Amino acid sequence: MSSTQTRKADHLRICLEEDVQFRQMTNGFERYRFTHYCLPELDFSEIDITTTFLGKSLNAPLLISSMTGGTEKQKRLTIDWQKLPKLIN
């Protein structure tokens, strides 16, 4: 394994196995505070959050962050992440 591959493999291993700062994954919304506006007249059945991305229809917007390659394990993880939207749509 090259030094770059070793570094990337170590990064993945450390995040999975060691006590790192951000052990809990979040969606980032804890950084924002929204003013509540009650909408009692809103008909939730009329809300449509479907979207189209790269010609594919999704039931809801989806964000998958980047994953770097470099090792066979990371390649497999990236491939698994690519399959996720099909599983939940």
Image: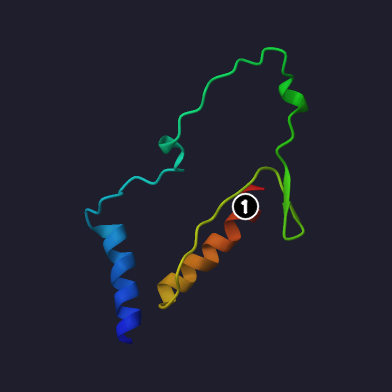
Q: Is residue 65 left or right of residue 43?
A: left
27 and 37: which one is in front? 37
Q: Secondary structure at mark 1?
A: helix
Outermost residue, top side? 40
Q: Which residue is drawn at the image coordinates 60% and 49% (left, top)?
A: 62
Give x and y (percent) for residue 44: 71, 23
Give x and y (percent) for residue 29: 46, 38
Q: Is residue 54 left or right of residue 78?
A: right
* Residue 36 in which image quadrant: top right
* Residue 83 in which image quadrant: bottom right
Give the colour scheme shown: rainbow
Q: Which residue is drawn at the image coordinates 30% and 48% (left, top)?
A: 23
Outermost residue, bottom side? 2
The crowd level at tag 1 (other Cα within 10 Å; few <14, some 14-19, many 20+) is few
Residue 11 against residue 47 in the figure, above or below: below
Q: Quadrant of the N terminus?
A: bottom left
Q: Which residue is drawn at the image coordinates 66% and 43% (left, top)?
A: 60
Residue 10 against residue 5 in the figure, above or below: above
User: Which residue lies under the disc numbered 1?
Assistant: 87
Give x and y (percent) for residue 13: 29, 65
Q: Which residue is drawn at the image coordinates 42% and 78% (left, top)?
A: 70
How many numbered discs? 1
